[in-house]
Amino acid sequence: MKHIFKYLLFLLIGFLIYLNCSLYYKPQFVKIENEVVNKEVYHQLQFLNTALQNGAGKKMQQLFPEGFVFINALYGLSWYELISELPTDAAIYKEGITQIRFALNEINSSNGKRTFDENLPLSYGAFYKGWSNYLLGKLLEVQPQETQSKTEEDLFISNCKEIATALNNSNTPFLESYHKQAWPADMLLCIASLNIHDNIFANNYETEITKWPTAIKERVDINGLIPHKVDAETGYSIEDARGNSQSLILNFLFEIDADFTKQQFKKYDRLFSDSRFGLSGIRQYPSGIKGGGDIDSGPIIFGIGGAASIVGQRVYAQQNDWATYEGLRNSIESFGFGLTINKKKRYIFGQLPMADAFICWSNAIEKTSDQVKVTTNWRIMFHLYSAFVLAVLFLIFKLLKTKPVS
């Protein structure tokens, strides 16, 4: 037993040293065909590609209510981020276009639509229509107009018209995702896709895009934030803001109304941003509120939400808070055990590709090596905590080596 205890101490000491070193992680950027790309993200996408080809979409659907659509949409959006600033003749750009189309074909397949109700006021509901049309819009946006597919253009334009019509016929700004069930985060994708339409084509939906934030400001929760879940008939909160949905909401609200996003972000930062042992994290529930986790929140450890932190990383990048962004990114890198094998990078040993998809999407916002500029060492407190724990572990180890006096 004494020897086993020694081995456990060695493991704990090694783990702490690994954590402290890995907090200095920086993604590698490399030149491919004279174009700089985030190599780490590219390797993440290669892992996800293999996982999806091997049925990860169906496997994630068994674990998450919208797992099939979610993982494919995030995969496609991560490719969009990677290639959005590359020339159209670059090999990786062409690879990205192919992979975004692959993701869209998966989403538009019977497997993608199976979970959703075609007969809702917005066919297949706000979640499905929002994510599928937003990704389709991003595919069109990243291509020169002369290379866009007429079929894809027509589908996107038709979807946007359907979204606007359903919204104008609704008493609430939040359309149903399922029968009599509505989540504001789903609706953000619908409105953001209308915004993409007006950026590419004519400004047909300026009224809907402008009016929508005004309507939701009348339906904020007790803290003045967009709710997690609302009454499908009135649009008023039945579940107040949570970290995972709030992180997702802010990522897309940024594209719709930047000023309103800043107002919401300040409240989010005050109520949800926190730290544990000196490391940044996003709470699943507002400060002062306790609650349990669910399949959407991911693990909640000491009040910090897994999904909230991963998606929140991207929010802080949008708001140019690079210290918090880096703190979240590197904590996820460390505790997620980011590992590259055969040019394929996975987290948590590749056991949950949905997590890999979210992490990839958040990491893909970082496009250049000098984008993250942090002047303070946010790791100091964690180093101090670790030094104390290591001192205790070494003391225990020394006591175990001491032979008892006969």
Image: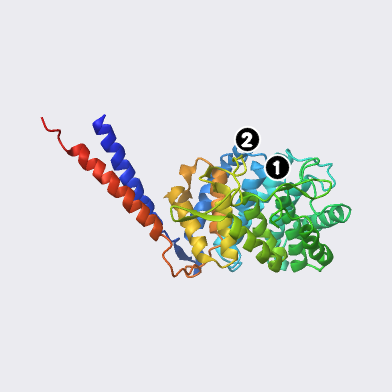
- Residue 342 location, x and y as percent? 43, 49
Mark 2 and mark 1 lie on one chain; the one further toward the N terminus is: 2
- Residue 234 location, x and y as percent? 83, 49
Based on the displayed image, in which of its 4 quarters is residue 90 positioned?
bottom right
- Residue 241 location, x and y as percent? 67, 51
The answer to whether residue 186 is above or below residue 181 is below
Q: Which residue is mark 2?
A: 62
Q: Look at 75% across and 67% down and name the residue there.
A: 200
Q: Which residue is mark 1?
A: 112
Tag 1's secondary structure? helix
Q: Amino acid at mark 2?
A: Gln
The quarter of the image holding the C terminus is top left
Visible in this render: residue 49? no
The reply, left or right, for residue 373 in relation to residue 270 is left
* Of labels 2 and 1, the one closer to you: 2
The answer to whether residue 294 is above or below residue 17 is above
Q: Residues within 10 Å of mark 1 (few under 14, many from 20)?
A: many
Visible in this render: residue 289? yes
Q: Amino acid at mark 1?
A: Gly
Based on the displayed image, in which of its 4 quarters is residue 215 positioned?
bottom right
User: Are circles 2 and 1 on residues that touch, CB within 8 Å?
Assistant: no
Q: Look at 79% across and 60% down and name the residue there.
A: 212
Which of 46/213 is in front? Answer: 213
The reply, left or right, for residue 140 in relation to residue 175 is left
